[in-house]
Amino acid sequence: MSVYATRTRTGRNSRSRAKGCAFYDLDGTLADLNLLHATLFFMANLGEWSGRAGYLARLALSLPRLYMAERHDRRLLNMKLFEAYKGISRDRLWELGDEYCDRVLMRHLYPRAVEMLEANRAAAIEPVLVTGSPDFLVEPLARRLNIEHFAANRLVFSRGLATGRMREPVMADSEKSAWCESFAAARRIDLAGCWGYADSYYDLPFLCALGHPVAVNPDRRLLAAAHNRKWPIVRFSHDAKGVGDAASSEAWLLDWLGGATDGAPGR
Amino acid sequence: MARPEGKLKELKTAELRHEPGARRDLVVTLNRRSAPRLIAYGDDFWYEKLPAGTRVIYPPPPLEPLADPDAAIRYALLRPENADPLFAQLNPNMRVTIAIDDISLPLPQMRRPDIRERALNIVLQTLADYGVDDVHLIIATSLHRRMTEAEIRRMVGERAFKQFWPERLYNFDAENRAELALLGKTEHGEEVWLSRRAAESDLLLYLNINLVPMDGGHKSVAVGLAPYQSLRHHHNPATLRQCNSYMDPTRSALHHSANRMGRLVNQHVNVFSIETAINNQMYGGMLDFLQKNEDRFSDWDRMRLKGFRWTLGNLSEPLRRQVLNQYAAPYSMTGVWAGETDAVHRKALARVFQQYAVPVKGQSDVLIVGVPYICPYNVNSVMNPVLVQSTGLGYLFNMFRGKPLVREGGTVIICHPLRDQFHPEHHPSYIEFFHRCLRETTEATELERNFEAEFARNPTYVHMYRYGHAYHGVHPFYMWYWGEPARQHVGRVIAAGCEEPEVAARMGWEAADTLDEAIAMATSDLGRSASITYLHLPPLVIADVE
């Protein structure tokens, strides 16, 4: 089970006072980025220029396939996208994950989302991340947001190098809700009292499993589903001053290029 | 034995019987030849035959509007009640806050220029003339939803909007702790919180619209600019049960509490109230037949009614809602007063009662009310079941002074389709309230004890209130409490034309497919001797029940 304890000591305290959990999706929900942005960052920050060019070219060629996968199956999209990581070392991925979190992800978190996460925590509703992003990216974020538990996707490594395959369970579609159920059962929490925040129609099973589903910046299909099911709809934006500086499309590009030009040599 | 045709021939043409003391034609007792009556039914209208003997209460005709509203506003500012003229209170270095009633008034929205725009332009010009620069405009939303930019622009007008939006013209935020000030406690221990900007101003102007006698007075400032910490002292079942009509401020514990709080505010802040009254010209032009006595319908009126109902019936539900919400009423100003809160409100109240009050003799066993498509809390939104409850049992039941229109233990028939529909962005906490809390209990005190604090502090609802356009998390509770005096008084509530009986059952009501069925259910115990009153809306009417 993809449960990671980042802060064991405080975790015990929070367990004793938690009234329930709030499960957050990451991409598009807490941050205005998606997995493709992260993958681009990783590819653009590999050690050798030739390596970068090769990986980026491969990624560019696979875009039509990724687009088709996105249209039909989120799980398939994740699997296809993670194939792009094949051959990259575990150490490098974790180091870049930390760097990506600092330089990009934290600046693209919706300030209101973080505010609400903290307000939930203050109301003894423990935050949990449930996302299709890779663990080497989610773990640093969870650490920075003081989140004790998260569920993320994990790559299979062979001799320290990513194979491009994913370990089960793949965090997408109904796997997310299954994970939430087992997480709640292990902690004797009633999911009917838990909150869930997600942005995509593919998260419908995940949201349906929770007593208080909230559609965040929903896509067209999730918006229709939320209206139909009478779920609250929340809209986050970067209007308000953020955790980091205000994000812009130019800033994204500079983040990646900056990272690419002064990135540490790869292993 | 006379044949039925013979009996029909014996009947005279419909005659209207006027009860003693009633203004002409305002209280009508129907006979067998009377025309069907128009009854508001959500986003539609029924045209239904009511049983002979039914008493119908019509609103009085609209009062004559002021010939020159701008001049009247200027006069009120120059000759205020128990206060110095506005100009005499101004100096260039002072801090002024103008609080304005929000979109919940009037209903439906009025044609432009809105009264608030007129008054605001004159007040702002006066402030500018005397060099007052530090001016903020706050929409006194209290726990209502934030108004959108377009709604504010329409309400305050281009001039004020361009000059002040968004830095100095904004919605009140009851959850911004840094911007709230505790002024003290009343002799009853009620905490009085207020917008910090308003509390720290040298002069606080409150600009209101009195649609019904419930509005205005100390309630404007003490509720409109106050957070949950203050409102919980009077928006609770215990207080509301002691209200013998919300429309009679002298006998309403809610108003007594708001008055205590408002007086404490006035001890700390220099409040200058500007109250306005409007007539009840809710529908005009092609829709003026909606305000007529149906027995006096001309062929042209009947044709327009048919066309109106046909059009509504052939529109999709969202489009129909949009069309109805975009309708602007041709209300006109009938009075404006300024100065000290109590003195101003006394005069405004007198004018409001002059517009709405109709003397009525005695109570009845059954009261029929039609709940329309709009209430103060669903402007540009959806009428959900909790709001139907607050409109039917809260507002329409309370349209009386003296005694309720229906006797104790009597029956209220509420005409509305009562659909399980909610607006997820405007009323998110209503959804949980209806589907979770009401499933457990409909008892207001239990709801208050078990759930109110949880909803009031829920981070998601707080977030949606502050940054989205949602009503505060606690708002559905207040709406439910609003119906508390009626629930204590009546024996049965029947939803006529109810499309989803489980919705009615969730609220403790009975459901009937048609109005005839509802009347048969209501009168089943009393038979033909049951007395029935139909409160004819629109527009609004207040019954002075002897």
Image (cartoon, coloured by chain):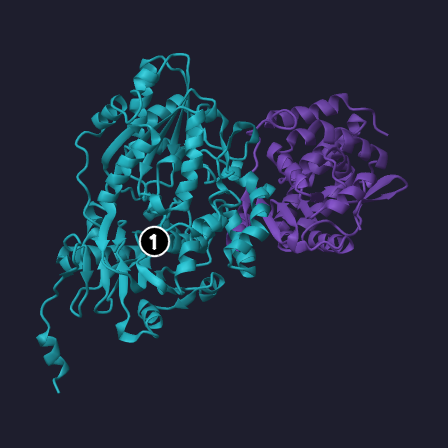
Chain colours: A purple, B cyan
Q: Secondary structure at mark 1?
A: helix
Q: Residue furthest bottom?
A: B1
Q: Position of residue B59 (x, y in %)?
A: 23, 51
Above or below: residue A39 compared with residue B380: above
Above or below: residue A150 compared with residue B365: above
Residue B432 in view of the camera: no
In the rendered structure, the answer to whether residue B241 lies left or right of residue A245 reads: left
Q: Which residue is mark 1?
A: B396
Residue B494 in view of the camera: yes
Q: Position of residue B82 (x, y in %)?
A: 30, 26
Q: Position of residue A179 (x, y in %)?
A: 74, 53
- Indicate the quadrant containing the N terminus of chain B: top left, top right, bottom left or bottom right: bottom left
Residue A124 falls in image quadrant: top right
> What kind of residue is marked 1?
Leu
- Indicate the quadrant containing the C terminus of chain B: top left, top right, bottom left or bottom right: bottom left
Q: Residue at x 46, y 23 (%)?
A: B167
B466 or B391: nearer the viewer? B391
Mark 1 Cα shell of 10 Å, populated few (<14), some (14-19), many (≥20): many
Q: Residue at x 80, y 51 (%)?
A: A1
B518 or A126: nearer the viewer? B518
